[in-house]
Image (cartoon, grey):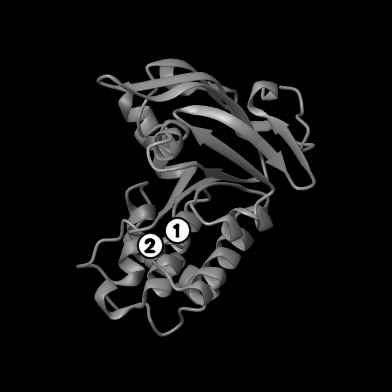
């Protein structure tokens, strides 16, 4: 696959994605590419299709029409729509990572158990999974908190647990939906810095929905949606109209 303007082969290539819910069109012919090692912010008003696009790119919800190609290093390109439900689940458990506003963490489990579970469902023995989880948590500044349940952690700490969970599986693309939305500005800035360090800082890709322009400004690119259509695609220092996006 040819390199795009970011200088790396696109890890995700979406072409003419359409998604409707009844009479409501959530995605209306959205096309974009995401490079390996690139951070992309998705913005737009409520109901513009931001989360629907994120879910489509992550293989959580298939579009009604369009093409989504995944091009991971050392692997043949995959047409995500052609994968079985089981294969897409495996993809989300290994190649993709997720950091959402709610964290999607299990409150009854400890921090290390939440992280280790992402490894154990991929076949890693419990002892090895716990050891890797503890290493990841310590690296993210959560030493001494491995045994705490989610109710014993702050919002910022829980997001760090979610980042550790996305990191330990070796995910090459991390999807984040308002990861700083429930945090105060200082904690949000710290979490965002950690998220960027653990993704693009390690040559991975980050695709993030946010309503906060200051958060989006930290990303390499910002795309904006309106009524399910891509209306702008801005890179640091440049901007193109939605009609120019390929």
Residue that lies at the very extreme toward the bottom in this rendered image: 144
**Residue 34 in view in this figure:** no
Name the residue: 25% across, 75% down: 151
Question: Mark 2: which secondary structure?
Answer: helix
Name the residue: 53% across, 50% down: 170
- Ranked by sequence position, the earlier of labels 1 and 2 is 2
Q: Position of residue 147 (x, y in %)?
A: 31, 79
Quadrant location of residue 112?
bottom left
Give the residue number, with chain letter if any, for mark 2: 115
Query: In the picture shown, does residue 83 fall above or below 93?
Result: above
Number of other residues with Cα within 10 Å of mark 2, as a class: few under 14, some 14 to 19, many 20 or more:
many
Give the residue number, with chain letter if any, for mark 1: 179
Q: Position of residue 111 (x, y in %)?
A: 34, 71
Asked whether, in this view, residue 47 is left or right of residue 4, the answer is left
Between the residue at mark 1 and the residue at mark 2, the CA separation in whole angstroms equals: 17 Å
Task: Work out which quarter of the rendered image holds the N terminus and state it.
Answer: top right
Name the residue: 48% across, 52% down: 211
Task: Work out which quarter of the rendered image holds the C terminus and state it.
Answer: top right
């Amino acid at each position: 696959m040819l390199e795009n303007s970011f200088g790396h082969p696109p890890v995700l290539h979406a072409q003419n994605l359409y998604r409707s819910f009844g009479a409501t069109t959530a995605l209306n012919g959205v096309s974009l590419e995401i490079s390996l090692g690139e951070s992309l912010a998705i913005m737009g008003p409520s109901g513009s299709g931001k989360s629907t696009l994120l879910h489509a790119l992550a293989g959580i919800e298939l579009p009604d029409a369009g093409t989504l190609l995944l091009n991971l290093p050392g692997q043949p390109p995959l047409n995500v729509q052609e994968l079985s439900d089981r294969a897409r689940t495996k993809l989300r458990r290994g190649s993709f990572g997720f950091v959402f506003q709610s964290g999607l963490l299990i409150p009854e489990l400890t921090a290390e158990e939440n992280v280790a579970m992402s490894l154990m469902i991929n076949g890693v023995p419990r002892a090895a999974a716990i050891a890797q989880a503890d290493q990841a948590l310590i690296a993210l500044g959560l030493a001494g908190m491995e045994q705490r349940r989610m109710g014993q952690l702050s919002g910022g700490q829980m997001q760090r647990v979610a980042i550790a969970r996305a990191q330990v599986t070796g995910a090459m693309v991390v999807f984040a939906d308002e990861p700083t939305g429930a945090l105060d500005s200082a904690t949000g800035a710290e979490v965002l810095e950690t998220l960027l360090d653990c993704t693009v800082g390690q040559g991975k890709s980050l695709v993030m929905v946010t309503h906060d322009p200051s958060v989006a400004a930290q990303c390499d690119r910002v795309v904006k949606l309106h009524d399910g259509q891509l209306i702008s695609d801005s890179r640091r220092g440049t901007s193109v109209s939605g009609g120019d996006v390929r």
